[in-house]
Image (cartoon, rainbow, N blue to C red):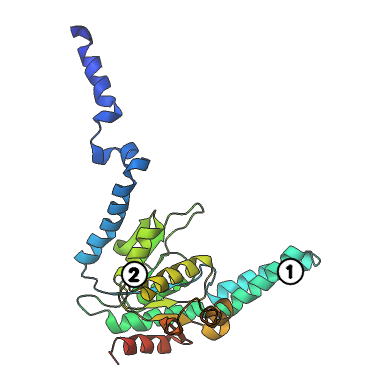
Amino acid sequence: MPNPSQLPDAVQRIMESPSYRIAFKDADFLTAYESRGHRLELEFEKPERKFNQLQIESTVPCFGATRVIEPCEAEKKLAIVKQRLEDNPKCPRIKHQLLQAENVCKLSKFYDMAREFARIVSEENKDTMPRKYMICTGGGPGIMEAANRGASDAGAMSIGLNISLPMEQRPNAYITPELCFQFHYFAVRKQHFLMRARALVVFPGGYGTLDELFDAVTLRQTGKMQKIPIILFGWNEYWKNVLDLQYVVDMGLAADEDLDLFQPAESPEEAWHKIKVFHGEE
């Protein structure tokens, strides 16, 4: 026990101890493994409060590849790869990069389509209250940027649900600032994508897009979420080569009616029309 002359120092040491920190201000406590449940709850609650505050009733999540970029940017990247191949004409790695760059150029039209689709939807719904059919993306580049940009073109608000990743990912510049959130947990982020969704619009994408797509398809198939149309944008050019859904059904691993969970679309107008028809609004 400290003698009287040491009491002030002893009290200071006590106050500096981690155990003395107020729990909600203790970063070590909040980020500990045992606090995961609390972090999941907080990560759900923060966006939920803002959505309720702004009376956001329904959304249209738009998924797609980060690598599907604006056509002019895709052309610039293709030119760079062509130059590299001229300098190293026998390099198989650069030859494959050229193939990829050429294909990204072909797919870059979906950037413009995503932008136009979001503009059409946002223009029609931007003055509704409660807010309906608000564009919602993962908040990153590529197709996500295009959709947020289309909403911005219409002078409408839009949502970005960004995710912290090992590689740096910044939100795109077209998200409404007060509706841009950063998530640590994919599961909570996915829940916010689908909770208010009135449709899911999926543009060409890779593994991340497939993950988000089939998470929603499984919930629809099992009746664990509201009925919404799942629009596959670019069926003829992309999705029919990626997804042989008929094969799954023919193998007896899915029901015939499960094919009806998907609806193809080839234009922004067609996609929006199918959404409205699904909900009896047209």
Residue extending farthest to the right is 90
State which quadrant residue 85 falls in.
Answer: bottom right
Whether residue 42 is situated above or below residue 240 in the rendered picture:
above
Count the numbered circles shown.
2
Q: At 54% across and 77% down in the image, what residue appears? A: 243
Q: Quadrant of residue 174?
A: bottom left
State whether residue 252 appears in this view: yes
**What is the number of the mark on residue 278?**
none
Q: Determine whether 83 is above or below 8 in the image.
A: below
**What is the three-letter code of the residue carrying label 2?**
Leu
Q: Is residue 233 left or right of residue 3?
A: right
As shown in the figure, which amino acid type bears the numbered disc 1? Answer: Lys
Q: Which residue is mark 2?
A: 194
Residue 176 visible? The answer is no
Instruction: Determine the secondary structure under disc 2.
Output: helix
Q: Nearer the viewer, residue 47 or 209?
A: 209
Query: Which residue is found at the position 46% from the left and 86% from the top?
Result: 265
Nearest the viewer among 228 and 75 is 228
**Residue 4: image location, x then y, percent:** 18, 8
Spot occupied by residue 237 in the image (x, y as percentages of width and height): 57, 83
Residue at point 47%, 78% (across, down): 254
Measuring from the top left, give residue 267's x and y in whole percent. Answer: 46, 87
Question: Split into 4 quadrants, where in the image is the N terminus?
Answer: top left
Q: Nearer the viewer, mark 1 or mark 2?
A: 2
Is 80 on the left-hand or right-hand side of 122?
Answer: right
Q: Which of the labelled discs sits on residue 95, or is there none?
A: 1
